[in-house]
Image: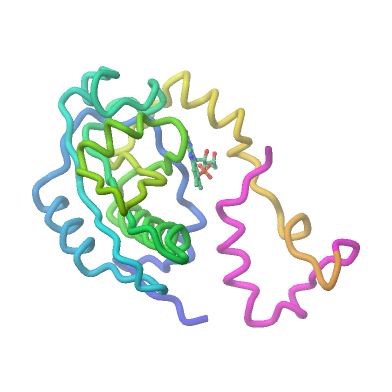
Amino acid sequence: MAEELLFGTPITEIIKNRISVRTYLEHSLTSEIKDKLSRFFSSLSGPFGVPIRFELIESDLALKGSSAKLGTYGVIKGASTYVVAVVEKADKDLEEFGYLLEKMIIYATSLGLGTCWLGGTFKKSEFAKAIKQKNNEILPCITPIGYPSSRKSIIESAMRFAAGSKSRKGWEELFFSCDFSKNLSESEAGNYVAPLEIASAGTFSI
Ligand SMILES: Cc1cc2nc3c(=O)[nH]c(=O)nc-3n(C[C@H](O)[C@H](O)[C@H](O)COP(=O)(O)O)c2cc1C
């Protein structure tokens, strides 16, 4: 597989090494980084062509850990900026959304930024208001975005433990040939070895 290079690092390495970040330094993103992200949002296009809007939403209240606005039930600490996206309701809307938010997350990782998919632990109505969600749009997930703190909050450590984030599943637990009684060997997988390994990078044990 030809490896796309982002900032001198193979994309496969970026994906394998990325972990969810829930504790951030209380620093705002630089304007250079915000410009890069905005330009990236405008360049994004997905496989199914479903219209999608991305916005960087900033909140001083979020920075102070208040749950009054842009709340995450205390799961995210220190972040004052979030990437919020809404996709128009359509066939393959969630597939388009997942593809593009992950693409954005990989780009952010290549810039040294931390992110964390949030599909549950965020106050959806507050983020919907911030992005002015329309009736024909859905807002499935968001991510905080910022500079990772080297220290993890207690909630973050508990979430990582509960989600089994440390123990990613191995190849033999994930890929099978014909039925679940026979493992897929790497020689059988052929050209699909690298894409399957990358797909498994985010697969964790619960
Ligand atoms: C679709 C999706 C939704 C998620 N929702 C949440 C969430 O609501 N809260 C949270 O703390 N983590 C959430 N996560 C992050 C997972 O908990 C995380 O990916 C998992 O623990 C594996 O850890 P890692 O990303 O560090 O490898 C979500 C991940 C995905 C893919």
Residue at 22% over, 69% down: 43
Instruction: Decide whether residue 202 is among the magenta residues.
Output: yes
For residue 115, what is the image quadrant? top left
Q: Residue furthest right?
A: 181
Question: Relative to 147, does residue 35 appear above or below in the rendering?
Answer: below
Question: Relative to 94, does residue 75 appear above or below in the rendering?
Answer: above
On screen, residue 190 versus residue 133, left or right, reads right
Q: Which residues are magenta?
A: 180-206
On screen, residue 40 versus residue 186, left or right, reads left
Residue at 47% over, 45% down: 19
- For this rendering, which residue is in front, 117 or 146? 117
For residue 181, what is the image quadrant? bottom right
Residue at 60% over, 29% down: 161
Residue 80 position within the rendered picture, expressed as x and y whole percent measured from the top left: 22, 32
The quarter of the rendered structure image containing the C terminus is top right
Residue 155 position within the rendered picture, expressed as x and y whole percent measured from the top left: 47, 21
Residue at 52% over, 81% down: 1
Residue 122 position within the rendered picture, expressed as x and y whole percent measured from the top left: 38, 31
On screen, residue 8 versus residue 196, left or right, reads left
For residue 160, what is the image quadrant? top right
